[in-house]
């Protein structure tokens, strides 16, 4: 994969799109910087689509439909899920059971890229987490 500066956790991406006040000022500055190469995982698309399908995220239908164009418009890089990522996610130590979080942490570790997230459990899984 080409050089990436930051991987977005799913909630960070959604907060970016919603211009949510919970978005860290440091992360917001990084996302606004045209020199920052931002990756979005295929696992995040899967998470949003799955949560929308089961009724846990009602606005997800619109987001799923607009996903490819939004990623392109923001200039973000798509990060596919590979076998290496899957094996790492499945073998990460710890009790954290959310498969999406485990995958994002594994991708962060495997790609050696920090993840923008306010979720401290990702640090416990071994990911380098950015948030302030």
Image (cartoon, rainbow, N blue to C red):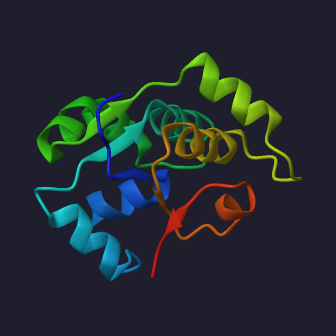
In the image as oriented, which residue stretches furthest toward the right? 95
Q: Does residue 4 appear in the picture of this structure?
A: yes
Where's residue 86, x and y in %? 67, 25
Q: Quadrant of residue 124?
A: bottom right
* Above or below for 60 versus 35: above
Relative side of 114 to 38, left or right: right
Q: Does residue 20 appear in the picture of this structure?
A: no
Where's residue 112, x and y in %? 50, 45
Write the residue at 69% across / 55% down: 126
Write the residue at 44% across / 25% down: 80
Specify the quadrant that holds the N terminus: top left
* Above or below for 68 versus 130: above
Relative side of 109 to 28, left or right: right
Relative side of 34 to 14, left or right: left
Q: Quadrant of residue 91?
A: top right
Write the residue at 89% across / 53% down: 95
Return the residue nearer the eye: 54 or 13.
Answer: 13
Where's residue 55, x and y in %? 59, 43
**Number of numbered callouts drawn:** 0
Write the residue at 52% across / 31% down: 46
Where's residue 13, x and y in %? 37, 54
Specify the quadrant that holds the C terminus: bottom left
* Above or below for 45 versus 101: above
């Amino acid at each position: 994969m080409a050089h990436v500066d930051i991987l977005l956790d799913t909630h960070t991406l959604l907060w970016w799109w919603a211009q949510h006040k919970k978005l860290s000022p440091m992360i917001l500055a990084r996302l606004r910087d045209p020199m920052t190469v931002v990756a979005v995982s295929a696992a995040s698309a899967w998470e949003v689509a799955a949560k929308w399908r089961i009724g846990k995220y009602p606005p997800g239908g619109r987001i799923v439909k607009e996903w490819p164009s939004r990623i392109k418009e923001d200039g973000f890089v798509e990060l596919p899920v590979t076998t290496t990522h899957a094996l790492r996610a499945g073998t990460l130590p710890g009790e954290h059971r959310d498969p999406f979080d485990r995958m994002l942490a594994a991708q962060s570790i495997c790609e050696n890229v920090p993840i923008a997230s306010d979720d401290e459990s990702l640090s416990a899984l071994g990911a380098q987490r950015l948030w302030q």
